[in-house]
Image (cartoon, rainbow, N blue to C red):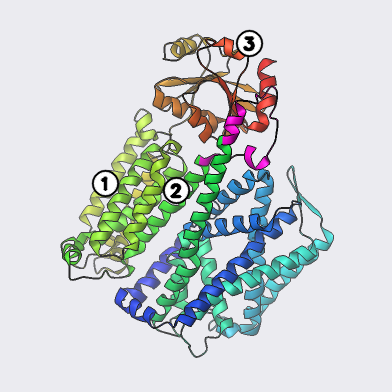
Amino acid sequence: MGLVLMVAAIIVVQREMRHLHWADIRHALAGIPAATLWAGAGMTVLSYVVLSFYDWLAVRQIGRTMPFRRTAFAAFCSYVLSHNLGFSAISGAAVRFRLYGNWGLRPLEVAQIIAFCSATYLLGAAVLIGGVLLWEPEMVPVVGARVPHLLLEGVGLLLWGGVALYILLGRRLNEVTLWRWTITFPSSSMAVAQTVVSAAEVAATAAIAYIFLPDAPGLGYGVFLAIYIASYTAGLVASVPGGLGVFDGAMMLALGSYMPSTSIITAILIFRLFYYIIPLFLAGVMFAGHELFLRGDAVLLSRKAGKDSPARGPRTARPSVVIRESEADFSVAVATGAVSLCGGVLIALTILDPETWDNAAGRLHTLFGMAGDYLLSLIGVALIGLAIGLSQRVTLAWKVTLGLLAAAAGLTLLRGSPLVIPALMALVAILIAPFRNSYYRHARVLSEPLSFPTIMSLLLLIACVIVLACAGPHDALGGSWWEIMLFASSSGVGRWTMGLAVMLGLLMIMRLIRPGRIAIMPWDGEGQAQYHMLDHAVDAVGVAWMPSGLIVGARGQALLPFVRRGTFLIGLGDPAGNAEDCVSAIWWLRDLAVQEGRQPAFWCVGSMFLSVYNDLGLTAWPLPGPAQEAHSPGVETFYLCARPTDARLLQSLMHN
């Protein structure tokens, strides 16, 4: 459904804007009064203030109490990131898990908050859409003039009936059991509060864009509200970063009969600036400050761990400090969304013709013109495929992504695009570059022997590249691949061959950057012999029973013995072998623990890889007495790396 919406939006936006220049938009922007800008800013503030009550209500629904400033902070950061990055199941959910996890909430409670907030939006949208269908069905875009009004009014009544049923169920249902989990159902008063808050937030957000539209006969606020909700919902369904293209295309299609394209795109751009871009920078600064304070607390906790061993237990407990999540998880989630956003921007970039400036950049554009947009649009597709690899923490995806972002920044600058485009590409590259340790998995194409499926994938990718190189633009007009496919005068077979090559190439990229499989060796005579041949192998790890097996590093140059004890998967000592491959073995143990539903931990490790264990969200606790004597006593301090809440239990498990 998202793909269909995106293709339809590309066709609509291209037809409406293919001859529109930035000079037209700048002229329209200059004509907006200052009072209108201030009114739009005020409505933006009001919208986000109302939005903060989503999380405030959700926290109370799960039976927790939390200061309003915290829930408002979580709502603002999560919604701003999900608005801009798309994939709200990744971006917005990652922020909430990160924040609420650090504030002491369990994963199921955070999941309930996310579900509650999603239901809240649906309630408000249903009330508003139902009202428009009941009162002004003829004003609904596209369908209002083609579908019988009685049918539309029936849909409106059905939406209102669904909301009323949700509210009334709160009088009958107290709890809902799903499998082994029991979830508290919202009371009738809470359901009414959800509906009111959501309806007010959606209405305020729509007012931001409505303020910037010129007066048009027949376009009242109620009509525009229906247009906005339909367009915004289409962007959500498509899961495109920021609803880019889909939201804009739906708005242009619905508003095209009321006003010219210049006025529509100007209002959309200012709306995006006020509701998306400016809040994104504010949320980024606020979240960065929070992370710095959190890291400072983590450092204090690590220092304190030197004084409080798990055997004695910590002297104090601060839930906001001791409950830490992996920083790598959050950075990977943000990188996935940000790179997808860049890919979408590059694909949609040719909607507006570049300015041909009378300077060096303009002359370079003349030389660059024919193949530039085509190449950038293909880079956009590749970035979307690589984002899947980033989400799976593949090193090759990280390296290629950095190269493509740098190339895109240079090419968009030569193209004469607005400086915000190359700046965005450079900023995303700078943001993901420091997190090299988060991408530890080697691609299957590099880490495993070449199999027939892998060879076929490589050959198909090469064939796609050859097809796209031969089918590229051959005149001065240039154009992206989707422009050529949809609007070129060439034969239909050739055009759809190009589209097939793009989609097949994207699929092959995703197949080739898949991470290698987690390799496990048995702890038998052969496994022990291979382990003890590696550097830093140890003869004992402070326990009296045998390991369950050996985890093999991504390159096969490191081995890590492990044991399963209760709900834990425990690495015994540091990995032995190549230092870089040792890092991948540590992360592989974490992945295996997640697959098995266990908690990862590491027993009797040295200081060499403490930063890696910290990236997993684990705290290092010095081990006393017998554990130290198992290694060379007096040479180095050894640690138990685990979540602070698990440290005492693991100490007991490993000695029993």
Q: Is residue 603 visible?
A: no
Give amino acid for label 1: Ala
Q: CA distance from mark 2 to mark 3?
A: 43 Å
Numbered tag placed on residue 588 in the rendering: none
Front-lying residue, 604 or 567? 604
Q: Which of the two discs, 1 and 2, sits closer to the camera?
A: 2
Residue 327: percent from left, percent from top = 52, 41
Residue 533: percent from left, percent from top = 42, 11
The segment highlighted magenta reads: 300-327
* Residue pictured at 26% horizontal, 60% vertical: 413
- Could you tell me which secondary element the residue under label 3 belongs to? loop
Tell me if residue 517 is in the magenta stretch: no
- Could you tell me which secondary element the residue under label 1 belongs to? helix
- Asked if the residue at tag 3 contacts the one at tag 2, i.e. Cβ–Cβ closer than 8 Å, the answer is no
Q: CA distance from mark 1 to mark 3?
A: 57 Å
Looking at the image, tell me whether mark 2 or mark 3 is earlier in sequence order.
2
Front-lying residue, 31 or 299? 299
Numbered tag placed on residue 544 in the rendering: 3
- Asked if the residue at tag 2 contacts the one at tag 1, i.e. Cβ–Cβ closer than 8 Å, the answer is no
Front-lying residue, 544 or 428? 428
Tell me if residue 312 is in the magenta stretch: yes
Numbered tag placed on residue 463 in the rendering: 1
Q: Quick one: label 2, few (<14), some, or many (20+) residues within 10 Å?
A: many
Image quadrant holding the C terminus, namely top right
Give amino acid for label 3: Ala
